[in-house]
Image (cartoon, rainbow, N blue to C red):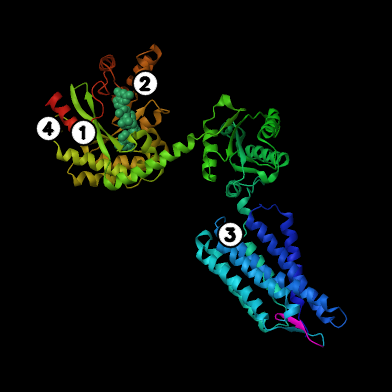
Amino acid sequence: MNYIYEFDIAACALMIMFSVLLAIRKNFPTYSNKLYACMLAGNLFATAMDLVTVFTIAKADTLPLWVNYLTNIVYLTSFNGCAVLYYMYVLAITKENRTTRLDRAVAIAVITIDVVFISTTPLTKWIFFFDEENNYCHGPLMLLLYVTAVFMLFYSFLISVKYRHSLTKYQIVSIVIFNLSLIGAIILQAIFSDILLQGFACSLYLIVVYVSLQNPDDYMDKTTGCFNQYAFNKTLEKHIVKNTPFTVLSFVPDDFQYINCILGVKNTNELIDSISVYLMNEFNAQNVFHLYGCRYAVMIDENTGDLDSTVFRLKAHFAKPCVINGTEVQLSPKMCFINYPDFANTPEDITDSLEFCLKTTAHDESNELVAATEEALVKKNRENQIVHIMKRAIQNNEFKVYYQPLYSTEKGRFTSAEALVRLIDPELGFIPPDEFIPLAERNGLIAKIGELIFRSVCEFMHRSDIFKLGVEYIEVNLSTVQCMQENLAPTMLSIMKEFSIAPNRINFEITETAHSINDKTLINTMNALIKEGSTFSMDDYGTGFSTANYLIRLPLYIVKIDKSILWPAMKSEEAMNVLKHTVMMLKSLNKGIVVEGVEDEAMASLLIDMGVEFLQGYYYSKPIPEQSYIEFLQEHQG
Ligand code: C2E
Ligand code: CA
Ligand code: CA
């Protein structure tokens, strides 16, 4: 038979060029990458062997028969081996570390069938044989080889469909299209056995796989050339699955934000580049990861030395200043490490523990090596638990609102109260709002919770007779995230309407951050509510920057001076001056003033003498439940 083998030559040339390109670029050593390299090498070998068999079959008259048997056996085994490699590759990218015994058994069974039938063919003549005239002939079971190859491809295809959620849509489409075309090519080959098509079809397929499934850039940090956070996670995962002990050292220059501000973006990037180059040269580049900003991780396993020597080398390097564009920068890195196996057993837990350790390492500890502790994970666990409790509390309306009376010094009675949310869980007990409100903000729950609190306040005002007991309005806290919402005013107004509460019965408390984050939305919301009669207070004055800017810009009715201004005033003359001048300044701006944290009579009389209009604090009452609040009012002004 005359074979058309030009496709095989083109395939070999294509794969050699492609292999060279891959070899010179930095590749992340994952299992799927290694399998991909094996597929490429395997396919190149099988195609080359195909060409060799064309030659040996043509020379069958002159060559010893065993040479022809051997070359054909090697060719057929390697070619069918490629289908099995491809199957393993699909398993690696879809199921990652979750391959089962059955998965492996399928591969072993197919290889065994192929090898047994192919290698015994000189005796059985089942797959191929040479007739009396030394012609190469297909045996009765030649088709079996095509069947096992197609089976492997089809089975891989089914796996990729089943585990499609671990692939992108684009990857699934390319697998489907090209798998089917490869199966088509094999069937064609079975029909037209003189055209050697398979090698070429496979090489095209491998290039498509590279483009659609192999994403080497996913692992690379393009600016520094280091491996990135994703690669770091994959490396951790690999070690954890194998259960091999390792240590990770993570570090960041102390005061990096400050360095960034002073040096500017361009110089800071140069600084990061120079650190990356140093790390990749000093340590094995495969063990160096640039996480983000100027944060790095170095993986220390049995091949890369120990923690002490790594730290020693880093310290020696950073003892000298870095020179960036002629400017000397002295860096002192904060360094944290974690051992596996220890308390953190997932990539996420390891990353979180290191991150928390670096964040909480004090300035004076920089240049010291600190061990990550379980604290971050305990905190994370509690946070997850609280988020779960909040979701349940939203569903079952379990949030309670307590009221803390505000004393009007002018009227000599309690004209208002601040509504303060309470969350009590049977297991965790009282959860402070300072703890769960920020979590609700980060988890997208605050809008719903804020609405529930406001409903509860309006419903209480509607149901009780607090107005008859001398209360004029209730103060309601708005979280910064609520203030960022465009529809806050209409939502609040419709709730007030539902319970027939006049908007002037509500004073909303906002904080400085609400102003700094989205000034425009906030002012629109404030104006819309003020138009209907509500008023606004600035909460926690004195805890932030307390700039004059927002006092002038925002339509504020009241400013609430924080306890951190009041309490020190009772102890030092300077702090007393701060309090006095704050009160005077706010008065000159015609703002009403509330002072919070009034805990004893001395504080109360001092503030009354200063002419502060409203006082709030434990001296008068702690925040109390609805019924106690009504009793409090009845007792004091009934
Ligand atoms: P905040 O708005 O500054 O509330 C005043 C906090 O000071 C309350 O703590 C109150 O119990 C406490 N306090 C009042 N008087 C005294 C005193 O004399 N001495 C001392 N040591 N503390 C006093 P609480 O209820 O734990 O609330 C903490 C923070 O949680 C609030 O600070 C507020 O930022 C937030 N929060 C509470 N309820 C809500 C709410 O319904 N919505 C929103 N968005 N945040 C709320
Ligand atoms: Ca408040
Ligand atoms: Ca406050």
- Of pointers 4 and 1, the one earlier in the residue sequence: 4
Relative vertical location of residue 172 with respect to residue 480 in this rendering, above or below: below
> For residue 609, what is the image quadrant?
top left
Tag 2: residue type? Ile
- Which mark is drawn over residue 93? 3
Of tags 3 and 1, the one toward the viewer is 3
Magenta-colored span: 126-132
Query: Mark 2 highlights which residue?
Result: 565
Q: Which sits in the foreground, 539 or 393? A: 393
Tag 4: residue type? Lys
Can you give x and y, in whole percent of width and height, for residue 483 in the image? 35, 41
> For residue 568, what is the image quadrant?
top left
Q: Is residue 580 left or right of residue 101?
A: left
Label 4 sits on a secondary structure element that is loop
Q: Which sits in the foreground, 574 or 441? A: 441
Query: Mark 4 highlights which residue?
Result: 468
